[in-house]
Image (tube, rainbow, N blue to C red):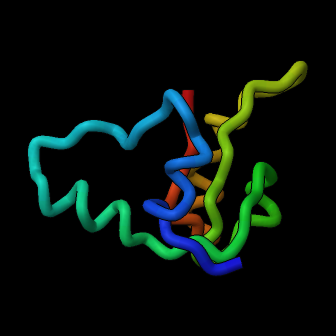
Amino acid sequence: MNKTIADLLPACAGYSLIPTADPQTAAACTRLSVSALCCDSRKASDSCLFFCLPGALTDGHRYAPAAYAAGARAFVVE
């Protein structure tokens, strides 16, 4: 899979990018390339879109820094 955030947004009805005061930053975010989807920071890799999901035992938001360190550059958060 090789998509941009802009390609994926239409499938996310009711969701949007985090607002930013800088239009250039918002435009750059939509051009981010996504090559994989993941929710396990141990499996995160370059250009993966990481889903921070709350779970029964732990909250995936806690693992966002580890996913970023592994190469994830886009995150779905609550």
Q: Residue at x 55, y 26 (%)?
A: 78
Count of numbered marks: 0
* Left or right side of 53 for 66: left
Which residue appears farthest toward the right when viewing the image? 56
Q: Residue at x 72, y 70 (%)?
A: 36
* Left or right side of 35 for 5: left
| Above-or-below relation of 76 to 55 | below
Q: Residue at x 73, y 61 (%)?
A: 37
Write down the quadrant of residue 6 in the picture. Answer: bottom left
| Above-or-below relation of 43 to 38 | below
Instruction: From the top left corner, tell me how far across and down residue 29 is, in percent.
Output: 34, 61
* Left or right side of 14 for 44: right
Comparing 32 with 50, the one in front is 32
Instruction: From the top left corner, tell me how far across and down residue 55 is, in percent.
Output: 83, 25
Instruction: From the top left corner, tell me how far across and down residue 14 is, in percent.
Output: 50, 28
| Above-or-below relation of 18 to 41 | above
Write down the quadrant of residue 61 in the picture. Answer: top right
Comparing 75 with 17, the one in front is 17
Instruction: From the top left corner, tell me how far across and down residue 49 is, in percent.
Output: 62, 59
Q: Residue at x 50, y 50 (%)?
A: 9
| Above-or-below relation of 74 to 60 | below
Question: Which quarter of the rendered picture does the N terminus lie within?
Answer: bottom right
Comparing 65 with 28, the one in front is 28
